[in-house]
Image (spheres, rainbow, N blue to C red):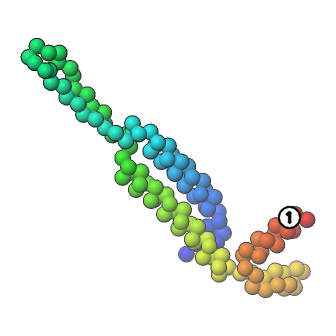
Amino acid sequence: MAKLNQIIAVEKGVKSKAHQDLTAAHHGLQKTGLLAGISRTYQPKDEEGEQLPPESTLVQVKAEDVLRDTAVTLTRLFDVTATKDWANCTARADVKVDGRVLVSEVPVSYLLFLEKQLTDL
């Protein structure tokens, strides 16, 4: 299992990439022309009618691919977040000043609170 400091180090990057990927997927799905394909062939009404060339446009974005990519992105984000949250449940440390323990077995959330208070002083 990864250590808490390792997870915290990658979490910001994973969140940023997930946001970028989801935004790109959203924008891609907004362009309905990319989702539609067409294949047309023309036949003249009679033997002397105008002969038009066939038309075709390939589908450029498949909803199934977007959903698969989104699942991969969200799975990574959820995995990193869950790992961090579960590690926060068990991670504890002592607060020492001059070698003397002031508070023992302090949870991470409280340590972060204390750090912020000291920074803001």
Residue 3 visible in the displayed image: no
The residue shown at (62%, 73%) is 85
In the depicted view, which residue is nearer to us: 19 or 111?
19
- Residue at 48% over, 48% down: 25
Residue in the foreground of this view, choosing between 43 and 97: 43
The amino acid marked with disc number 1 is Thr
Q: Quadrant location of the N terminus?
A: bottom right
The outermost residue toward the front is 45
Q: Residue at x 53, y 48 (%)?
A: 23
Which quarter of the figure has residue 84? bottom right
- Decide if residue 42 is on the left or right side of residue 3: left
Which image quarter: residue 3? bottom right
Residue bearing the label numbered 1 = 119
Percent coordinates x, y for residue 10 in the rendering: 61, 61
Residue 34 figure quarter: top left
Where residue 78 sits in the image (x, y, percent)?
53, 66
**What x and y, as percent, mark residue 77?**
54, 62
